[in-house]
Image (tube, coloured by chain):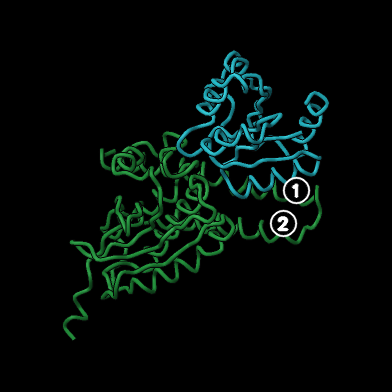
Chain colours: A green, B cyan
Amino acid sequence: MSRGSDKSIKSRERLLNALAEQIKLPLLQIARQAELAKIVGNPQEHLSTIEFTAGTALKLLDNYLLAQRLSQTGSELLLEPVSVAVVLNDTAHQLHELAAYYQCALELHMSGRYEPIMANRIGLEAALTSLGYVFIEGISTSSGENKPVVKLAAHRGKNGIVTGMFAASEGLTTDMYRRARRLHGRVRQPLTGLTFNSGAGVFIADSLLSSMSARLRIAHHQKLAGLAATFMPSKQLNLI
Amino acid sequence: MKILLLEPDTLLGGIYKTALESVGCNVFLYKNAEQAIRSIDRQAPDLIILELQLVRHNGIEFLYELRSYSDWRDLPVIVLSQVPPHESGLDPGLQERLGILKYCYKPKTSLTQLTKFINQLIPFA
């Protein structure tokens, strides 16, 4: 077996470990919510939460499977001109209910209007959603504020359009993230400054973005730290 | 009985709080170690229920800091964690030194089991 494929298998195993740790949480939430419904009654309220929790876990699994299929076939996602605003809007739509459950304020922010970027819409949305799960879960815990803000944002950087998730988290530094990329799947909490869990969503996002030849990095948006990727604007429409 | 519950997950925290309140406990819920330590003098709990896996500072660091205050040296603690006991680094000797009454592994500890154990402690609160 070549060294490259050996490294690839180990990387997939680590992502699976991180995902397995992460999925324990929604399953635990479902089990305990169901038990609570039996104890205190009012099953309707509990059933809605159970349904929502299961849905969130399923989406995370889908995002993981997409990342794994791409990684296994060695293929890259087909790039096309994608509207950043549309992707951010659709992602926010998917995350708003989770933000409400975790008592966070999810904000959407774009500094100006941008031309379309070269990306894969499904992959980018899956990556941002996976990131969103980790940020919302983590910031709701670490912040002392009543309704902490998590921002889904885009701005123009020197190399292209930067888009990602941002929040007032002291624990998000380049060193921390570099260490987390080495440790994920091997330790329970590779991102202790951001989340109490395995942060699998971050590494799923990283894998998806890699298949678009983009890279997840620490970035800043309006004094908030976050994780984001840079995309080249599409030159096609400039010719029209 | 007044319980300080240190649980980082919003949904789980709400579930445990409701279950404990259903058996007559007064529950103060905190999501991170810093908030809990700052509030403990004000709340004066009879018991702490603690998750080990927290943001920034873990539950074991919290316990060491708690025990450094003379007022809180003898406050009983129940660990309710998603970390399996054999992976926690808390051997029986260390659990005793840190005043941990019981180590509950979350996937294997139902709400009924937790509240039953708390009920057994109430006469001693």
Q: Residue at x 61, y 56 (%)?
A: A54
Badge 1 vs badge 2, beta-carbon distance below 8 Å? yes
Q: Residue at x 64, y 45 (%)?
A: B13
Measured Cα–Cα span from mark 1 to mark 2: 8 Å
Amino acid type of disc 2?
His
Q: Residue at x 55, y 35 (%)?
A: B38
Picture layout, residue A200 above or below residue A240:
above
Residues at discs 1 and 2 both on one chain: yes
Q: Quadrant of the N terminus of chain A?
A: top left
Residue A171, percent from left and from top? 38, 42
Residue A51, percent from left and from top? 65, 60
Q: Which residue is mark 2?
A: A46
Question: Chain under label 1?
Answer: A
A231 sits left or right of B86 in the view: left
Q: Which residue is mark 1?
A: A36
Residue A191, percent from left and from top? 41, 41
Picture layout, residue A186 above or below residue A84:
above
Q: Quadrant of the C terminus of chain A?
A: bottom left
Amino acid type of disc 1?
Leu
A174 sits left or right of B74 in the view: left
